[in-house]
Amino acid sequence: MRRARPGDVPRGTGGISHGRRAVGEERALTSVGAGVDFDDGQAGHGTDTARETDTRGEERVQSKLWHITLSVSGAEAPLKEVRRGLEQLAHDHPFLLTSRYANDHAEIRYWEEARDLHDAAAVALRLWGEHRSSAQLPPWEIVGLEVIDRQTYHQRIAEGYGPPPAAPVGVHPF
């Protein structure tokens, strides 16, 4: 799964090796395309069953962009530490759009690329716990999760419902 802001160009072309290489054997680099639904400017505006056929004639499900809002809460922590932790998380993972925080709760908003809602939610639910140590985040619990597709996000914004667009980008107090 690739985490990105809408419209970003795919990063990295490095292949992953799961086996041992022989001495002197070079690792081949490969590129992975972002998919038709990602490049045509209409991502999230087609059907929910976007599919394509690969070079072997096999059908595979395309990934979609999902807007994630993750809410965490817990015991009070110094505001400077909360902000520093969220800034470190945003630095380590530039796919984050915006974070808002107080001394006892925070909200993180970003775009996730995933095959379906279940995959996007699973990745989002792991985000805080997996990066708690590396970003020195407070030991808070996840208290809320919203996962919506790109079309729903834009429809809500156009109708004046839901949160305003994630701007300004960055880490901000509530």
Image: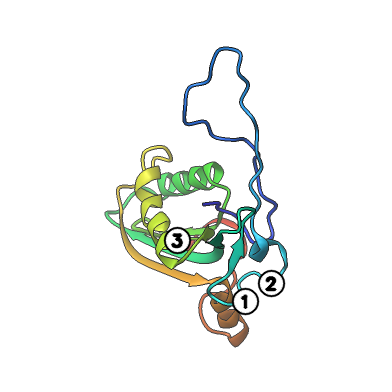
Q: Earlier in the sequence, mark 1 or mark 3?
A: 1
Q: Identify whether 38 is placed above or below 148.
A: above
Kindly check if marks 2 and 3 are in contact, taking CB atoms under 8 A apart as contact: no
Kindly check if marks 1 and 2 are in contact, taking CB atoms under 8 A apart as contact: yes
Dot 3 alpha-carbon crowd within 10 angstroms: few under 14, some 14 to 19, many 20 or more = many
Question: For the residue marked with disc 1, what is the amino acid?
Answer: Gly
Separation of marks 2 and 3 at Cα, in angstroms = 20 Å
Q: Dot 1 corresponds to which residue?
A: 46
Q: Identify whether 113 is placed above or below 20.
A: below
Q: Report the disc number at residue 120.
A: 3
Horizontal and vertical percent position of residue 79:
41, 50
Separation of marks 1 and 2 at Cα, in angstroms = 7 Å
Q: Secondary structure at mark 2?
A: loop
Q: Earlier in the sequence, mark 2 or mark 3?
A: 2
Horizontal and vertical percent position of residue 61:
53, 63
Q: For residue 15, what is the image quadrant?
A: top right
Horizontal and vertical percent position of residue 65:
56, 64
Q: In front: 174, or 89?
A: 89
Separation of marks 1 and 3 at Cα, in angstroms = 18 Å
Q: Dot 2 corresponds to which residue?
A: 42
Dot 1 alpha-carbon crowd within 10 angstroms: few under 14, some 14 to 19, many 20 or more = few
Q: Residue lying furthest left in this view?
A: 75
Question: For the residue marked with disc 3, what is the amino acid?
Answer: Ala
Q: Secondary structure at mark 3?
A: helix
Q: Report the disc number at residue 17.
A: none
Q: Residue lying furthest bottom in this view?
A: 159
